[in-house]
């Protein structure tokens, strides 16, 4: 488990829950260094003092705000920690809302909240169970990294999770991005709806496609070049931007999705036979008499 990135408390009305904040995700991206192309010498970032024209170690570097060209106000970490805000040392819950009322575009990084000490066990469990029973999420405010933030608390596998969220004025309006009006038929909408149904899964966890193919491909390129081999190249794709038959594309997409789910090699969107319910299937198995043979089946057997 990673090291805590912050410690404080959850303020829940008059209830205080001591907690530690731990990252809920990890980054598996491949990192690169900068090199001089002519001799492959490492290019490093150095922090130089403009007045003394020398490199400054981290211990001598502080924070400051430039009021104007000639005035800089220095701010140290102790002053930031002692900010006159109730959220400076606490995650203050301000409201509870239905989970579906939160626009996902506002949600940012996720953190696990771990109870800090035995004194936190009961209030932590109380808040967790109350959130789970009401199917609601808590909206909170907290101060990290030099600013006050909006947060969302929810339950995941018996642990309270904190998500940082954007403020209202940080979410851009998408109204200018809406395409111009076009004609869409009911049949096209029905086909698209059927495609959605054909591609619907209960959970994304463990799905075959839920893997980072880019990182795996990049590793192949790096290993090939390290071994002095020619790196693999992507297959050439047909140029995009051409006009396609939307109905035909939907039809083929539905058939491909159904085939991938084992619904037959020749599945189409024209016939959607309802599945028998478990109740009917069970009744058929327990029927003592054999069902009457269909005429078409009798003819085939007679033949």
Image: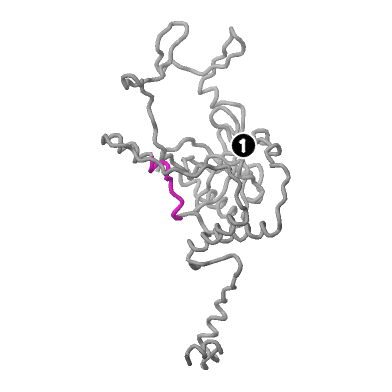
The number of numbered badges drawn on the structure is 1
From the viewer's side, name the closer residue of 11 and 255.
Answer: 255
Quarter where residue 15 is shown? top right
Q: Is residue 78 depicted above or below 288 in this figure?
A: above
Residue 208 magenta: yes
Q: Position of residue 172 (x, y in %)?
A: 66, 35
Secondary structure under tag 1 reads loop
From the viewer's side, name the closer residue of 239 and 144.
Answer: 239
Q: Position of residue 16 (x, y in %)?
A: 57, 42
- What is the magenta range? 206-217
- The residue located at (26%, 36%) in the rendering is 227
Quarter of the figure with the N terminus: top left
Q: Position of residue 261 (x, y in %)?
A: 49, 63
Q: Is residue 261 depicted above or below 286 in this figure?
A: above
Quarter where residue 174 is shown? top right
Q: Is residue 12 left or right of residue 220?
A: right
- The residue located at (72%, 42%) in the rendering is 180
From the viewer's side, name the closer residue of 93 and 244.
Answer: 244
Q: Is residue 175 left or right of residue 291?
A: right
Quarter where residue 68 is shown? top right
- The residue located at (57%, 49%) in the rendering is 154
From the viewer's side, name the closer residue of 50 and 57.
Answer: 50
Please name the residue that numbered disc 1 is placed on. 166
Disc 1: CA contacts within 10 A as few (<14), some (14-19) or many (>=20): some
For the rendered model, the colour scheme is one colour
Q: Position of residue 75 (x, y in %)?
A: 54, 18
Residue 213 magenta: yes
């Amino acid at each position: 488990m990673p090291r805590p990135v912050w410690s404080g408390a959850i303020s829940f009305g008059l209830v205080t829950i001591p907690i530690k904040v731990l990252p809920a995700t990890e980054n598996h991206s491949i990192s690169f260094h900068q090199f001089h192309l002519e001799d492959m010498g490492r290019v490093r970032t150095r922090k130089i003092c403009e007045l003394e024209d020398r490199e400054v170690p981290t211990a001598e570097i502080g924070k400051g705000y430039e009021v104007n060209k000639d005035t800089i106000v220095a701010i140290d970490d102790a002053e930031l920690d002692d900010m006159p805000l109730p959220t400076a040392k606490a995650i203050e819950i301000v409201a509870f809302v239905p989970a579906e009322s939160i626009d996902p575009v506002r949600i940012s990084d996720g953190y696990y909240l771990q109870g800090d000490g035995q004194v936190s066990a009961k209030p932590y469990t109380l808040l967790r169970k109350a959130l789970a029973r009401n199917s609601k999420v808590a909206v909170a405010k907290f101060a990290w990294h030099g600013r006050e933030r909006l947060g969302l608390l929810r339950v995941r596998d018996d642990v309270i999770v904190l998500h940082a969220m954007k403020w209202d004025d940080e979410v851009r309006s998408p109204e200018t991005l809406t395409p111009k009006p076009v004609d869409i038929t009911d049949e096209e909408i029905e086909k698209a709806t059927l495609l959605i149904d054909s591609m619907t899964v209960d959970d994304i966890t463990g799905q075959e496609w839920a893997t980072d193919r880019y990182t795996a491909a990049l590793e192949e390129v790096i290993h090939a070049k390290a071994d002095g081999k020619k790196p693999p190249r992507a297959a050439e794709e047909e140029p995009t931007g051409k006009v396609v038959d939307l109905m035909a594309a939907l039809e083929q997409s539905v058939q491909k999705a159904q085939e991938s789910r084992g619904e037959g090699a020749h599945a189409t969107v024209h016939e959607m036979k309802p599945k028998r319910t478990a109740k009917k299937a069970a009744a058929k198995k327990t029927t003592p008499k054999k069902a009457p043979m269909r005429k078409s089946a009798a003819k085939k057997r007679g033949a």
